[in-house]
Amino acid sequence: MSVRSSAEALAALAGGANLIDIKEPVHGPLGRADASVWEAVRAVVPVHVPLSVALGELTEACSLPETLPAGIGYAKLGLAGAGSGWIHQWSQVRARFPSVVWVAVSYSDWELAKAPHPDHVLEAAIDADTCGVILVDTYIKSNASSLDSSCLPWVERARQAGLKIVLAGGLDLSAIRRLAPLRPDWFAVRGAACVKGDRTDRIDTQLVADLAACVVT
C-alpha cells in the first residue's frame, strides 16, 4: 500500500496492508516524499512490516539524499526517460545505498514513458545482485493496467530467477481478481484505496480492508 504520511500508514495498516510503500503522488508515478515523511512513517510502522520508498526516476538520481533512514527494506527508481546508459547509471545508484533491497521498475506503458522494454528491465534485474524484486507499474496513472495472462511467461521467468514480483498500476478489485492467476508476491495500490478513487486524496481504511480481503480470498 502506497502512503504519503504517517497517518495514512496507520490507516493502511488498520485495513490489513502487509507492506507500506512511501511515495508522494503529486511528484509523479514514483514520486519521492520528503525525508521527514520517511522518518515519520518509519516511526509508526512496526518493524516486522516491510517498508519501501519510491525515489522518483533515475533521471532525478542526482538529487537523492546521501543516506536512507534505518529500517527501510526496499527502494525503487523508475526508468522513464532513461537513456542508453541506464544499466550503468542504475548500478551506480544502487551502490550508493547497499543496505536496501532494490526493486527494478518495469513500466507496462514503457513506450509512453520512454523507458526500457520490460524484457530489458527483467534481464538487468536478474543480473543485479542487489536487486530482489521487480515491479510492473504504469507511468501514466490515468491509464488502466494492460496486464493480463499473456504476461505469465515473463512473470514466471522473474520468479524462477528468484525475484519477488509486484503488480501495480491503477489496480482495483476487478483488476486484482483478473490478475490473481499470475500469483504476484504483492499487489500494490493507491488510487483504489483513496477517497473517491483519487490517488492524491487520503487513504480510507475500509477501502484498504476490501482490497486486502480480495487478495486473501
Image (tube, rainbow, N blue to C red):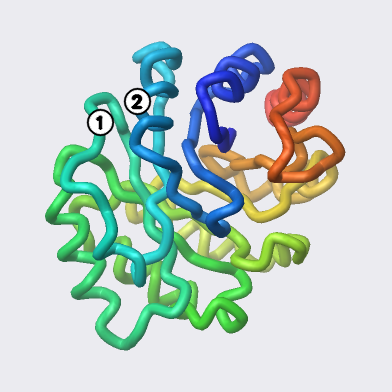
Q: Position of residue 2 (x, y in %)?
A: 57, 37
Q: Nearer the viewer, residue 35 or 96?
A: 35
Residue at the disc numbered 2: 39
Answer above or below: position of 37 versus 192.
Answer: above
Q: Position of residue 215 (x, y in %)?
A: 70, 30
- Asked where in the image residue 99 lies, by quadrant, the reply is top left
Amino acid under disc 1: Pro
Name the residue furthest bottom.
84
Is 144 on the left-hand or right-hand side of 190? right
Q: Are marks 1 and 2 in contact (CB under 8 Å)?
A: yes
Residue at the disc numbered 1: 69
Crowding at dot 2, Cα within 10 Å, few <14 / some 14-19 / many 20+, comes out as: some
Q: Residue at x 60, y 42 (%)?
A: 188
Mark 1 or mark 2: whose residue is earlier in sequence: 2
Answer above or below: position of 76 versus 81.
Answer: above
Q: Residue at x 69, y 47 (%)?
A: 181
